[in-house]
Amino acid sequence: MAMDLNAKAAYIRGLMTGMDFDADSKNGKVIAAMMDLLEEMAAQVTEHDNALDQVYDELETLDQDLDDVVSDIYADEDEEDAEDDSTMYEVTCPNCGQISTLDEETLMDPEGDLVCPHCGATFDIELEGTEDDSAEETDKQDH
């Protein structure tokens, strides 16, 4: 836009130069002063436009840097949340009495038997509350 203003001001100046323009007449002095003002305004707009472009570039850089900082800060929390999502359970081996920690997926796998990492014994577990839960479900179905 600003370059268009400078080009237009130069075009008007060229028209004034190309015609028999009397800059010494009363009307000519006014038109010449207006032309000078127009050229100064076009130059100021160009200067402000260039400064604004620079500010936008710097703002874009700051925005990208801020995004990097935010992702660095919250990436650690996201990793911690992912670790916290898997609930761990303690299981006591009926053979050796050692306590092992298992995740919910391993514990609830109906196909897999649990193997003690300490003694190698294979065993099944009963989850606490499963008998009560199934009795309550049966009572609810009867009523």
Image (cartoon, grey):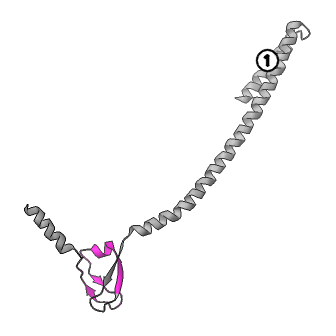
Give above or below for 31 relative to 1.
above
Q: Is residue 120 above or below residue 44?
A: below
Give the quarter of the image for residue 13. top right
The percent coordinates of residue 102 (x first, y second) are 35, 78
Question: Extreme top residue here?
Answer: 26
- How many numbered tags mark residues here? 1
Q: What is the secondary structure assignment of the residue under circle 1?
A: helix
> From the viewer's perspective, is 37 left or right of 25?
left
Residue at 77% x, 26% y: name it: 42
Identify the residue position indicated by label 1 in the image: 12
Q: Quadrant of the C terminus?
A: bottom left
Q: Nearer the viewer, residue 5 or 55?
A: 55
Amino acid type, residue under disc 1 in the picture: Ile
Magenta stretch, residue numbers:
99-125
Q: Is 35 in front, or is 101?
A: 101
Q: Name the residue: 84% across, 20% down.
A: 36
- Expressed as whole percent of the image width and height from the top left, the position of residue 137 reads 15, 66
